[in-house]
Amino acid sequence: MVAGGDAYGKLENAALAVAGDRIAWIGPAAEARGRAAAQDIPIERGDGLWITPGLIDCHTHLVYGGNRVEEFEQRLCGVAYEDIARAGGGIQSTVNATRAAGAESLRASAAIRARRLMSEGVTTIEVKSGYGLDLATERRMLETARALERELPVSIRATYLGLHALPAEFRDRRREFVSNVGGPWLEALLDAGLVDAVDAFCEDIAFSLDETESFLRAAQASGLRAHVHAGQLSDMGAAELAARYGALSADHLEYLSARGAQALGSAGTVAVLLPGAYFTLRQTLPPPVPLLRAAGVPMAVSTDANPGTSPGMSILIALNMACTLFGLTPEEALCGATRNAARALGLADEIGTLEPGKRADFALWRVERPAELCYNLGANPCAGVVYGGEPRPSSSA
Ligand code: DI6
Ligand code: FE
């Protein structure tokens, strides 16, 4: 994961120098020792440890009220996710719980989840709204996301997931809801400095291609990039739409045609793979990874941490599942939580690889070889984290 290295971009017996919050230099440890001694620079030794870029969880729904354990039981008794959603459960039930939750309880529960991710070497987390679906609660969710970054040594990207589900009070006023989301609500949230990007759930049980497009158009007019939940349960052509709008990412993609993969490849849109949701919904058709590879689509891997379809807070388990369930190589999976995840957030110049000039976000691991980060199921070999050039106290994660 170092530019210029071999497989994984790896360098052995290497050293990394930090100046301020940036990576200043990377090279052979022997050379670093000489330079450090000459310039009286303090050295931290990490003998036997591997260093990777800080991991990036580029698709989460970390902020929410309540949980969905009843739905978990229902699904295991044979009720389909789509049927629960159509009956007013699913996302709507988390919307009810999130609207009822006070700002403090939202903040506290989100901080616990963020810390879980951070304990596994995560230094950047994307956080979506989408469980408010009214302006006040969407604002509260995005403010909570921003507050996490002030409270914890972690970088947060806040995404306005305006089109997630049609809330009950708009059941007979679909068009009005969609035009609020891309109109006055977007404007208000943007004016408040709460939006880094937008997202929409384009699916039969959620929003159509036309509705999604109207939101993407509004976002584009405001200079915002987009993510799209595409092809999770069916192929509606959402990946092609995402590509047409130059979206940063198209996420899920279990249902994706060769044309869709080519469109993503040509647009440079990242495919964000979310094996935790696939696992939880006990889906059986994995995303077409060979098509994505053939089309040159960068693949990222993320937790999709959310109460309904992926109640997991482990990026390392997501990496394991990306390999075991989707057939990624461990190298692809690791690239998916570093370099390609940075790209999915539009932050490729800033984070995601260990290169001079990038932010000094990195994790140290007590593993024998990098593939071990994907191999373990439930172990946490993280031996330390540096965030923005500062060692992160283990108590904060
Ligand atoms: N797809 C998902 O997997 C999440 N959102 C989405 O559009 C989960 C939504 C939920 O069930 O709460
Ligand atoms: Fe999601």
Image (tube, rainbow, N blue to C red):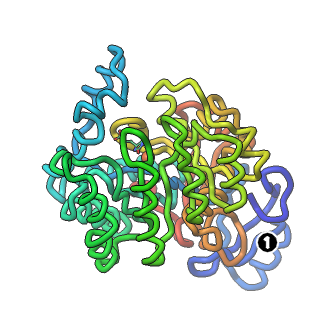
Residue at x-position 25% and y-position 65%: 139
Query: Mark 1 packing: few (<14 Cα in 10 Å), some, or many (20+)?
Result: some
Image quadrant where residue 292 sits? top right
Residue 156 shows in the view = no
At label 1, the amino acid type is: Arg
Q: Could you say whether the residue bearing mark 1 is in a helix, strand or loop?
A: helix
Dividing the image into four equal quarters, which quarter contains ligand 1? Answer: top left
Image quadrant where residue 153 sits? bottom left
Q: Nearer the viewer, residue 240 or 233?
A: 240
**Relative to 199, residue 82 above or below:** above
Residue at x-position 22% and y-position 35%: 88
**Relative to 203, residue 349 above or below:** below
x, y (%) of residue 25? 74, 75
Q: Nearer the viewer, residue 64 or 216?
A: 216
Residue at x-position 65% and y-position 33%: 326
| Residue under pointer 1 | 33
Residue farthest to the top? Answer: 77
In this picture, residue 285 sits left or right of residue 308: right
| Image quarter in which the N terminus is found | bottom right
**Relative to 301, residue 220 above or below:** below
Residue farthest to the bottom? Answer: 39
x, y (%) of residue 304? 46, 45
x, y (%) of residue 287? 62, 36
